[in-house]
Image (cartoon, coloured by chain):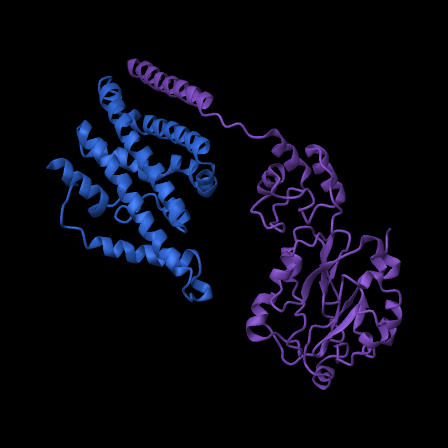
Chain colours: A purple, B blue
C-alpha cells in the first residue's frame, strides 16, 4: 500500500516538475509564425506533389508569403487558387499557365505488333529491362505505371494505352518520371480549346521504312504536316514530327493537317462526344 | 584516470551505435549530409549529457531513497521526453534551417533507445555522479563521431557509380556493418562492463 502512495507521489511530482519547466520554456522560446503562411497553405491544393520544385506545399506557402515565389507558382492549382492566394496577400495575381501531360504513342492493343511473348512482371519498369513484347522499342508497354503513379486519378488505360483526363490532369509530371520510355511529356495547354488539343502519337525517331514495318500508326517522317500547316505549329525533329504547343492553339487549320497525315499519327486527345464543357 | 577511461570507452571502444547497436534510426536517417549530421549529433549529445545528469539525481535521490527503483524506466523516459521537447523548441527558435533539416528525427530522439540505453547502463554499472555525466557526454560524442564518419562516407558515395539495387538503404546498411567491424578493432583496449 505504502509503495503505491510513494510511487504515485514520486511520479506525480516529477511530472509536475517537468511540465512546469516545459510550460516556461514554451513561453520563452515561442516562435511566431506569420499567420498568412497558414492561410496560403489552406488555399493551396495540399497534394505535396513537388511539381513546383519545393519540398512541400508548406515550403511554397512560406516562399509565397516571403515574396520569393509568385502566387501562381503552383502548377497544380488553377487560376482560382492563384487568385485566392493573391487576395490573402493583397497583390495582383498573374494568369496561370496550365500544363498537361500528353502521350506520344498510338499503338493500341489491337494494332500493336509484337516481337516476343513476355510473361515477366506486369509493370513497365520491369518490362523495360528485357524490352517487353511490343515490336517498337519506343512504344508503350501498356502496363500502366503512369496510372499507378498519378496522384490525381487523371490517367486511365484504354485499349492498352494511357488516356489522360484533360480536366483532372494538373501537369505535375509524375507520370513523365514513371514512364521508362519517355512517351509522356508535359506541354502547354489551353482549357478553352479542349477539342483542339492534339498529339503526335509516336515517339519513334527512326526512318520511315523502319517505322512502317513495326507500327501502322508510327510517324514515318514524311514532313507533310510541317508543309501543310506553314505557321510552324508542326515541325520535324530529324525523322519525327513534333508539335510546338506554344503555337498550336493559334493554328486554324490543324484539322486539315490531321486528315492529311498518311499514317493517321496525329490524334485528338478528346473525342468530340466526350467533351463536357 | 577512471574518468578518462570511461570517456574513451564510451566514445570509441563501446561505441553506443556500432557496438551496442542502439540509436540506429537517426544513424541511418540523418547521415546523408554532414551539416545535419553535426546538428543531430550535437542535439543528441546535449540530451544525453543532461539526461545522464538528471536521471542520476532522480535515481539516487528519489527512487533509491524511497525504495521504488522499479520506477526507473518510467521516470527516465519522462526525463528524456521533456529534455527533447526543450531541445526541439530551442533549435526551432534559434536555427529554423537545422530544424527543417532534422525533420522528424528530432522528436524521434525521444524514443531513441541510445539515450534510454545509456541511462540504464549508468544505473547498471553503478557510476557515481561525475562518472555518469562523463559517460553521458562520451556516449554523445561517440554518437556524433559515428554519425559524422557515416555522413562523410555517404557524401563521397554521391559521386560513386552504385548498382541500382544497392542505392540508398542497402548500401547504408552494408557500410554500417563494415564500420561496426572496424570499430571491433578497438575492443580489448579498455573494458568497462
The residue lying at 42 percent from left, 38 percent from top is: B106
Looking at the picture, how far across and down is residue B44, in whole percent?
A: 34, 38
Looking at the picture, how far across and down is residue A191, in whole percent?
A: 81, 53
The residue lying at 30 percent from left, 47 percent from top is: B21
Quadrant in which residue A67 is drawn:
top right
B192 lies left or right of A99: left
The answer to whether residue A226 is visible is: yes
**Of A240 and B128, which appears nearest the observer?**
A240
B42 lies left or right of A59: left
**Of B6 and B92, which appears nearest the observer?**
B92
Q: How many marks?
A: 0
A37 lies left or right of B77: right
The answer to whether residue A122 is visible is: no
Vertical relation: A203 (above or below) A247: below
The residue lying at 65 percent from left, 81 percent from top is: A115
Looking at the picture, how far across and down is residue A42, in whole percent?
A: 66, 35
Q: Quick one: quadrant of the N terminus of chain A?
A: top left
Quadrant in which residue B131 is drawn:
top left
Looking at the picture, how far across and down is residue A27, in whole percent?
A: 46, 21
Residue lying at the far left of the rendered structure? B1
Vertical relation: A48 (above or below) B83: below
The residue lying at 26 percent from left, 28 percent from top is: B53
Residue lying at the far bottom of the rendered structure? A209
Amino acid at each position: 500500500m505504502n509503495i503505491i502512495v510513494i510511487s504515485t507521489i514520486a511520479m506525480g511530482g516529477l511530472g509536475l516538475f517537468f511540465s512546469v519547466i516545459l510550460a516556461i520554456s514554451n513561453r520563452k522560446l515561442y516562435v511566431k509564425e506569420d499567420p498568412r503562411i497558414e492561410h496560403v497553405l489552406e488555399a493551396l491544393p495540399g497534394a505535396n506533389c513537388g511539381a513546383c520544385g519545393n519540398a512541400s506545399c508548406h515550403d511554397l506557402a512560406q516562399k509565397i508569403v516571403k515574396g520569393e515565389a509568385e502566387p501562381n507558382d503552383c502548377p497544380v492549382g488553377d487560376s482560382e487558387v492563384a487568385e485566392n492566394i493573391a487576395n490573402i496577400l493583397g497583390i495582383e495575381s498573374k494568369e496561370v499557365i496550365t500544363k498537361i501531360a500528353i502521350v506520344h504513342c498510338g499503338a493500341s492493343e489491337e494494332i500493336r505488333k509484337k516481337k516476343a511473348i513476355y510473361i515477366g512482371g506486369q509493370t513497365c519498369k520491369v518490362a523495360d529491362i528485357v524490352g517487353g513484347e511490343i515490336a517498337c522499342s519506343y512504344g508503350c508497354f501498356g502496363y500502366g505505371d503512369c496510372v499507378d503513379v498519378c496522384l490525381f486519378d487523371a490517367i486511365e488505360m484504354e485499349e492498352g494505352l494511357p488516356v489522360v483526363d484533360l480536366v483532372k490532369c494538373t501537369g505535375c509530371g509524375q507520370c513523365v518520371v514513371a514512364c521508362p520510355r519517355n512517351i509522356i511529356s508535359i506541354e502547354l495547354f489551353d482549357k478553352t480549346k479542349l477539342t483542339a488539343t492534339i498529339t503526335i502519337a509516336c515517339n519513334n525517331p527512326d526512318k520511315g521504312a523502319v517505322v512502317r514495318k513495326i507500327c501502322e500508326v508510327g510517324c514515318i517522317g514524311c514532313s507533310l504536316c510541317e508543309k501543310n500547316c506553314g505557321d510552324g505549329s508542326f515541325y520535324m525533329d530529324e525523322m519525327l514530327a513534333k508539335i510546338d504547343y506554344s503555337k498550336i492553339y493559334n493554328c486554324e487549320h490543324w484539322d486539315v493537317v490531321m486528315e492529311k497525315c498518311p499514317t493517321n499519327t496525329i490524334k485528338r486527345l478528346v473525342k468530340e462526344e466526350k467533351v463536357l464543357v | 584516470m577512471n574518468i578518462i577511461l570511461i570517456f574513451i570507452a564510451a566514445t570509441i571502444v563501446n561505441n553506443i551505435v556500432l557496438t551496442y547497436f542502439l540509436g540506429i534510426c537517426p544513424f541511418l536517417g540523418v547521415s546523408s549530409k554532414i551539416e545535419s549530421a553535426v546538428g543531430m549529433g550535437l542535439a543528441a549529445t546535449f540530451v544525453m549529457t543532461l539526461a545522464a545528469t538528471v536521471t542520476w539525481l532522480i535515481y539516487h535521490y528519489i527512487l533509491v531513497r524511497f525504495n521504488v527503483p522499479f520506477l526507473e524506466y518510467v521516470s527516465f523516459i519522462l526525463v528524456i521526453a521533456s529534455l527533447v521537447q526543450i531541445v526541439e523548441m530551442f533549435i526551432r527558435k534559434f536555427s529554423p534551417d537545422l530544424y527543417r533539416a532534422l525533420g522528424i528525427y528530432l522528436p524521434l530522439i525521444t524514443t531513441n533507445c541510445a539515450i534510454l540505453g545509456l541511462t540504464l547502463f549508468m544505473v547498471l554499472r553503478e557510476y557515481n555522479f561525475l562518472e555518469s555525466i562523463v559517460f553521458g557526454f562520451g556516449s554523445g560524442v561517440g554518437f556524433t563521431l559515428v554519425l559524422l564518419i557515416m555522413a562523410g562516407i555517404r557524401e563521397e558515395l554521391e559521386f560513386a557509380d552504385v548498382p541500382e539495387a544497392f542505392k540508398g538503404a542497402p548500401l547504408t546498411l552494408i557500410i554500417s556493418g563494415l564500420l561496426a567491424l572496424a570499430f571491433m578493432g578497438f575492443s580489448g583496449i579498455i573494458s568497462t562492463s
